[in-house]
Each structure stands twice: as structure tokens, then as C-alpha cells.
Amino acid sequence: MSLASRGYALNILSLGAFALVSGVCFAQEVQNQSWGHQAKFGIDAVKAWSIVKNKCQDSGVVVAVIDTGIDMNHPDLKNSLWVNQKELNGRAGIDDDGNGFIDDTNGWDFVTHTGKLVDTHGHGSHIAGIIGAKAGSSAGYNGVCPGVKIMSLRYYNEKASGLENLKNTVRAIEFAVKNGANIINYSGGGAEFSSAEMMALKTAEEKGILVVAAAGNERSNADVNLYFPAAYDLNNMLSVTAINQVGQVLPSSNWGVRKVQIAAPGNSILSTLPGGSYGYMTGTSQATAFVSGIAALMLSSKRGLSVADLKSKITASATKYSQLIGKTQFGAAANAYAAVESVTNAQKQIVLPAPSVQPASRSFAAASKNPASVGSKKLLKNKKKHNAKKGARN
């Protein structure tokens, strides 16, 4: 496959709609429809929040979301934006922090070359919402780590070539590394190895940045048919596949016991969309965002955790399911509560001296440099049902 073919497919599935009649109804629908947050085959976020939810917003943790942009004015996203203080308090039209980008107050759009962030597709806003949305009202939506700071970096242009999208990906990774990201969420990819992309991710590894990447939506064994960047052999990479409401890997999702470490919810996931809306998407993109959110929860609970700490605790605390054996490296799905508890319990333990004698281990997840989501989007806005645009990006 040539670089020019890099893109991601957005396959439309049929989902039942529901009507909204009031804000209270919407709040109840959020609770009922956000199965990925729940304990049964979800990440058990509600219990994790009892430990760390209110720490996310003020933790200083930054998650770079390399995607299609973000709706900066969404009531549940506007308070979760990363802020470049030097640019915020600087002069308009001047590169106040000297990083090579003018007025990059909340991130950067590598398609339009501006700090004015938009999301004309919806995928980026959906991913950002899963990770860090903070409900702007009683009728809003909370992501996994509500209020964690999202550095939005738009790389994807559906009118550009796959090569240009790949170049934008590399630029976005470099921006995240240089500007203080702790976690990079990348829900895109493709079948082509890129030395420039790998080197950018290697630099992220050297800086102690965890990269959570989508395993891909190509119905394929990722151990045989490599999907990048998830397939790079770097210690800071964590590859994620998607499961449904009964813990099964989605038919559309890639799997692999070597190249896919863990699973997370990815079927019919409710989250934020542009225009103050909400809706559903399906794919390894969404699963990846859940795991990025868990990593953000852990860092919010205990700053200073290394990439090795994050990866080992996320995988060791994951819930094992028989249906995931042979599908992921650990045969397990991410569990936010267990992961956060593993961090907080470690903080409470008393460390004893060692004994003197010790006894003798890139569509957004489809074939492309695009977001890896497959599924339908149903927009919910002003308490009414709207139809999302349907289409495919290649």
C-alpha cells in the first residue's frame, strides 16, 4: 500500500435512535447509554471517580489528541482545553513562547496552520470527550478523566493525500513532545512504516511520554498485517483494540497477541460532537481514548509515574475475559478502578528495608492516516435528534 492511500474508513452501521424531551431525560440517557463507563465489560470509571475524579482538572496532566480538531465551544469541552499561558498572556500575532507557532493558545491545526481550532468532521471532538469532557451542566457528559487538559492537534485533512496526513502526524507528535504533553492519544494509522514517524515517537519515549494508539479497524491479525504507529517496537507504545457490550472484540477491529496489548470499549460509544452535540461512534479510536483517559486518571492521582509504571499497571490491573484470549497480549480489557487503585494503594504502602538474604519478568484505526472509527454518529442537540453526516474517508 502506498503512502498516498493512507486514510481511514468510516463505515456506517445502523443504530436505534432515542428521543430527548428534557435535560433530565438527556442526563438519564447519558448514564444509561455510556456503557463504556460502567463496570460490566466497561472500564468501571464510576468507582475510579470515587478516588480521583476531582483531581483531573487541576492535576496539570496534558493529553495531546492528534486527530481532526476539537469544538472549543462545546459546553463539556471548553473547560478541558490545554492552555499555553505565554500565548494566552502574550501579544496577538506574535510567537510569544518562541516555539515556532504563533498564537498556539490551545493547540495547533496543521491543516490550516493556525491556532484557531475547529472540527469539521467530529471524530476529534468525540475522542477528546471520551478522554476528558467535563459536564458543563447537570445534563452534560463526563469523560474518563473529567477536566484533564486536552492539547488538540489536528493532522487529518480528508482532501489531502495520505503522505501529507502522515507528515502532519509527525509534526503533531513533535509539537506534543516539545510543548509538555504527558500522554499522546493517536487514533489513526496505516499499513506503512515511516522512519520519520518512528523517530518522532522515539523522542516521545525519551521524554517519558506514553503513546496510546489504535490497533486498527481492518478485521485483521495485527501480528501478521502490521498497523502503524501501534506496531512500532517502542517501550512507550500501548496498542488498543475494541470490544462490545459482552466483551468480544468487534468484527471490524484488529487483534494480535504480540502487537495488541489490551482491549477497551469501542462499540456504540456516546461522546461529544461539534455544535454542542452528542452522538455515537464505533471503533478502536474510541477504545484508545478510554485507555488514554485511564492513564490520565492514574497520573492525576500520582504525578511522576513513569511510562513503564503506567503500562505495567494498566495491563496488570486489566480484567481478564476468556473471549479475549488469543486476541490481545494479556487477554484482558482495561479497568480504570483497578488501575487507579493500584496506584493509590502503592502510595499507602510502607516500604520496608530489603532482607539481607533474598530468595533466589492509521485510519483512525483503519487503513490510513486518519481517525480509526467505524460506526454511525447520531447528533443530539438542543434536546432534539439530528442526523449525522454519513460518509467515508480514505
Image: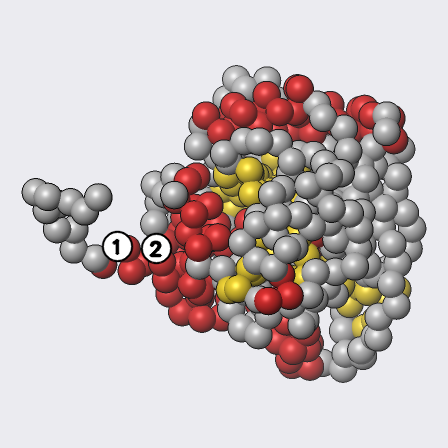
Disc 1 secondary structure class = helix
Judged from this view, the residue extending furthest toward the right is 391
Q: Which residue is mark 2?
A: 343
In the rendered view, tell whether residue 304 sits above or below residue 242.
Answer: above
Judged from this view, the residue extending furthest toward the left is 356
Q: Which residue is mark 1?
A: 347
**Residue 269 in sight from this viewpoint:** no
Q: Residues within 10 Å of mark 1 (few under 14, many from 20)?
A: few
The picture places residue 257, in percent across and down from the top left corner, at 61, 48
- Residue under the image location 37 percent in, 65 percent down: 51
The picture places residue 214, in percent across and down from the top left corner, at 67, 45
The picture places residue 120, in percent across and down from the top left corner, at 81, 45
Measured Cα–Cα span from mark 1 to mark 2: 6 Å
**Residue 354 in sight from this viewpoint:** yes
Q: Please state which amino acid type lies under the numbered disc 1.
A: Gln
Q: Please state which amino acid type lies under the numbered disc 2.
A: Val
